[in-house]
Amino acid sequence: MEVLSLDKNWQKYEETKDRFIQSIAKNMTLYGITPSIGRLYGALYFSNGPMTLDDMREELAMSKTSMSTGVRTLSDMKMVEPVFRRGVRKDLYQVEEDWYKSFTALFSRQWKKATETNIEEANEAIDELEAVLSNSKDEELKRLIYDDLERLDYALHYYKWLLQFVDAVETGKIYEIVPKYLRNREED
């Protein structure tokens, strides 16, 4: 009877872990990461040590190519790092333990890129609308263009603020306003 209970405990343990990994995978889309790469991250996070591509393939039943692409993506996003172990010939990887650091890298890159693109597009729209404005004699069209130029000006101010926010995240100043929560299980 004790063996049956032990097996149920192991099963519950694995199910709980898998449910959390699935949650991570589903929400990784917020950072532009596919769910399969999210599952890879979850598997690495819960591993009891660094893993090789073969270990990951076996754990997730995915191709080695998919694992390699996933690890490269996670590495580029500073979420996974290579690990050296003397005597081990295969590449080993582990998750970046500092989620704040990972968030900073992910958030900064994604938001900065999108914001800079929006600034560029807004400036192009302003230039084009001003050209139309200078060539038009239609008062209704001019009124619409002035309204749109005000909207675009507002958007540019917002994007500049957003870049300041991204800078605060990149430099770590954000943690002066919203401190990192460093949890110690013994404190609970």
Image: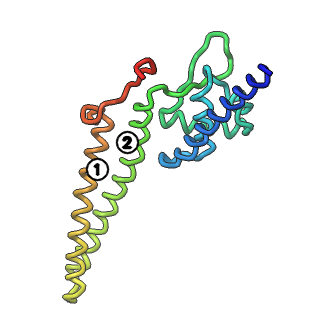
* Three-letter residue code for mark 1: Leu
Give left or right: position of 125 versus 5: left
Q: Which residue is drawn at 40% across and 42% down?
A: 107
Callout 1: 10 Å neighbours few (<14), some, many (20+)?
some
13 versus 83 height, above or below: below
Task: Locate the C terminus by quadrant.
Answer: top left
- Residue 131 found in image quarter: bottom left
In which quadrant will I find the N terminus? top right
- Residue with the mark numbered 1: 162
Amino acid tagged 2 = Ser
Q: Given contact means CB atoms under 8 Å apart, are the residues at marks 1 and 2 in contact?
A: no
Task: Please tell me which of labels 1 and 2 falls first in the chain.
Answer: 2
Q: Residues within 10 Å of mark 2 (few under 14, many from 20)?
A: many
Residue ID at (26%, 79%): 132
| Residue 135 point in image, percent of width and height | 22, 82
Residue 148 horizontal/vertical position (percent): 25, 73
